[in-house]
Image (cartoon, rainbow, N blue to C red):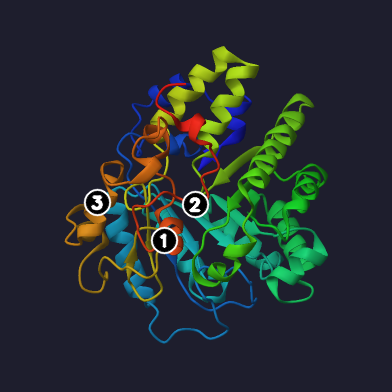
Amino acid sequence: MIGISKLYCGSVEPSDALRYGRQSSRLPSHLLQFSKDKRPVVVWNVTRACNLKCVHCYAHATDDTSANELTTQEGKALIDDLSDFGVPVLLFSGGEPLVRKDLPELAAYAVKKGMRAVISTNGTLINADTARILKQIGLSYVGISLDGLEPVNDRFRGVKGAFQKAMQGIRNCQASGIKVGLRFTINKRNVKEIPGIFDLLEEMDIPRVCFYHLVYAGRGSALQSEDLTHEETRAAVDLILDRTRQLHDQGKPKEVLTVDNHADGPYLYMRLQKENPQRAEKVLNLLQMNEGNNSGRGIGCVSWDGQVYADQFWRHHSFGNIRNRPFSQIWSEPLDPLLKQLKEKKKYVQGRCATCRWLDVCSGNFRVRAEATTGNVWAPDPACYLSDAEIAQTL
């Protein structure tokens, strides 16, 4: 996760993270990515069921509730363990998390245990009553997924009317006083929608947006051929940087992040070297604190059936099940060789990644994409758009 607005527009300085000792338990949410201890943010896919049919769903969501879902009591036991382990954020996802009737109870329990609880949702089920309940719970944030404006979004979501329902969900959250933001997965089909998403942020006064690079997992694997070329990715990132800066300069700052391609960090740094060399060195310091991809270290995933993964995209390799062993033990006392390696992944990456001058700020980028493309989990990430000259040890 690369905080474009934090880094490019100067809303965060290295001293901000250092002031808190860089400990996850002390850092405010907007500085968590710079923590030193890397206590994992945990994504809990509470259900596989979903009311939409998104073409790029990493979870292969269906319209049926899984009979093997963790029960409410098993979920609370998981939350107890995560809280005791020092997990700072629990992200409820799916499927569509609001399909689960006990979601408010589980989220409220997480807040009671001292964690920041957030929800990743398609937004279509957030009526006024649901929004009020989520506010009363003390939910920290609601992230609503859109893949463009109405025609494009509804084609992606597989259900006509999904866009308008999501818009109403956003308005309901705003009326209840809940911080709400957008999530957008970039690919060839919708890259031209990025300006419209920025317009939407401004028109609806939405404070945050996360632009996700495509990951080849779940139904997203079928879209691999529709990922952007390296040149198209550069153009998209430049556009995101430009629009973020424009809003900031107009006195309408928004929190803008890119996710799942850590080449964005060095790319941003190199751009700043030309535009603002003094700021560039501060950004490099922050990127080094961030450390790039944290799958298996600073982020983890628990599935609806209790399986533990390195992140929400890596569903073909489980490290264990919380029904047999607590998450805290699976994570901190790994028995699986791959999990051990992921915690020190910079030692294992191969090819151009192994000699890349940005390895300390990228950590080899996304291993799932490398494996999906080559069959080798340690091969270079094919979505890295930096040239050989840009990653050379000496320039």
- Three-letter residue code for mark 2: Pro
Estimate the spatial distance between the alpha carbons at disc 3 and disc 2, rounded to whole Å: 20 Å
Sequence-wise first label, 2 or 1: 1
- Three-letter residue code for mark 3: Gln
- Residue 86: x and y in percent read 30, 47
The residue drawn where x is 45% and y is 70% is: 46
Disc sitting over residue 341 in the figure: 3
- Residue 155: x and y in percent read 75, 71
260 w.r.t. 81: above or below: above
Q: Which residue is mark 1?
A: 374
- Residue 109: x and y in percent read 41, 61
Estimate the spatial distance between the alpha carbons at disc 2 and disc 1, rounded to whole Å: 9 Å
Residue 11 seen: no
Please state which of residues 284 and 356 is positioned toward the viewer in this rendering: 356
133 w.r.t. 341: above or below: below
Q: Does the CB distance between marks 2 and 1 fall below 8 Å?
A: yes
The residue drawn where x is 46% and y is 68% is: 105
- Three-letter residue code for mark 1: Thr
Sequence-wise first label, 3 or 2: 3
Disc sitting over residue 184 in the figure: none
Disc sitting over residue 382 in the figure: 2
Residue 53 seen: yes
Q: Nearer the viewer, mark 3 or mark 1?
A: 1
Q: Nearer the viewer, mark 3 or mark 2?
A: 2
Quarter residue 55 falls in? bottom right
245 left or right of 72?
Answer: right
337 w.r.t. 22: above or below: below
- Residue 186: x and y in percent read 65, 54
Sequence-wise first label, 3 or 1: 3
